Image (spheres, rainbow, N blue to C red):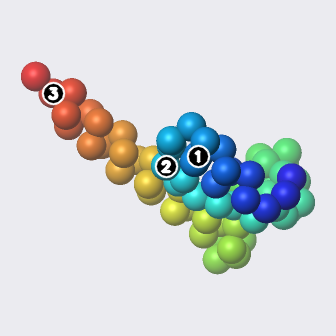
Amino acid sequence: FGTGGGKMLCERFDLELLAQVPINPAVGRGGDRGEPIVVSDPTCEEAQALKRAAQRIAAKIAVRNTHALP
């Protein structure tokens, strides 16, 4: 893991970068325990980044589904 890899891949494949989540071992440990960082530490930088990503994904799905209506 380094810096800018996600951005580079998005540029290469002409995709939108939805979020950048800082690497923090607490995210993985919480996931292993079944306690996501957004629950155990909702105000931390990683949790906020994950929430932004989820919001952007949900918005994109809603728009896509609206356009798919008959």
- 2 with respect to 35 (left or right): right
Contact (Cβ within 8 Å) of mark 3 with mark 1 = no
- Snapshot quadrant of residue 3: bottom right
Q: Percent x, y for residue 46?
A: 70, 67
Residue at 45% across, 56% down: 55
Nearest to N terminus: mark 3 or mark 1: 1
- Which numbered disc, 2 or 3, marks the residue closer to the eye? 2
Residue 35 showing in the rendered view: no
The C terminus sits in image quarter: top left
Q: Residues within 10 Å of mark 2 (few under 14, many from 20)?
A: few
Residue 5 showing in the rendered view: yes
Q: Amino acid at mark 3?
A: Leu
- 65 with respect to 36 (left or right): left
- 1 with respect to 70 (left or right): right
Q: Residues within 10 Å of mark 1 (few under 14, many from 20)?
A: few
- Snapshot quadrant of residue 49: bottom right
Residue carrying label 3: 69
Q: Nearer the viewer, residue 35 or 67?
A: 67
Q: Residue furthest toward the bottom?
A: 43
Residue carrying label 2: 16
Residue carrying label 1: 10
Q: Residues within 10 Å of mark 3 (few under 14, many from 20)?
A: few
Contact (Cβ within 8 Å) of mark 2 with mark 1 = yes
How many angstroms separate mark 2 from mark 1 (CA)? 6 Å
Question: The residue tagged with tag 3: helix, strand or loop?
Answer: loop
Instruction: Tell me if residue 22 comes above or below residue 43 in the rendering.
Output: above
Q: Nearer the viewer, residue 9 or 37?
A: 9
Question: The residue tagged with tag 2: helix, strand or loop?
Answer: loop
Q: Residue furthest toward the front?
A: 12
Q: Percent x, y for residue 45?
A: 68, 74
Residue at 54% across, 53% down: 17
